[in-house]
Amino acid sequence: MTFGPAAAGVHPPSVGPMRTPVPKCPIRLGEPCSLCEPGASGPEDCALVWLVMTDPELRARLDEMRRAGRR
């Protein structure tokens, strides 16, 4: 014997496969991470991202570019 929505002929909507998230490059604003640094598996271990984020002048310039892009 069937109970619940299936008994009434109502089936829950099918859910498609989940998409894999695509990390965004924090340096090339608005673009996905293209693994441009050899050995990197994403922004979390990218040497370029590390360099920019640890250099105060480069990080300040990146912040300026982000603010300009929001206008």
Image (spheres, helix red, strand yellow):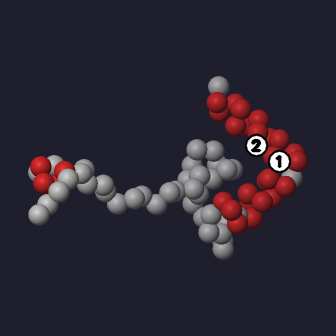
Q: Position of residue 70 (x, y in %)?
A: 64, 30
Q: Position of residue 41 (x, y in %)?
A: 62, 69
Instruction: Kindly report the distance in space between the C-alpha atoms of the residues bearing marks 1 and 2.
Output: 6 Å
Q: Residue at x 31, y 57 (%)?
A: 16
Q: Residue at x 70, y 30 (%)?
A: 68
Q: Is residue 6 above or below residue 70?
A: below
Residue 15 seen in render: yes
Q: Secondary structure at mark 1?
A: helix
Q: Which residue is mark 2?
A: 62
Q: Secondary structure at mark 2?
A: helix
Q: Is residue 34 above or below residue 29?
A: below
User: Which of the 4 quarters of the picture holds residue 48?
Assistant: bottom right
Q: Position of residue 46 (x, y in %)?
A: 70, 64
Q: Dot 2: within a 10 Å radius of its alpha carbon, few (fewer than 14), some, or many (20 or more) residues?
A: some
User: Which of the 4 quarters of the picture holds residue 34?
Assistant: bottom right
Q: Position of residue 18 (x, y in %)?
A: 39, 59
Q: Are marks 1 and 2 in contact (CB under 8 Å)?
A: yes
What amino acid does circle 1 point to? Leu
Q: Which residue is mark 1?
A: 58
User: From this viewpoint, which residue is outermost toward the bottom?
Assistant: 39
Quarter holding the C terminus?
Answer: top right
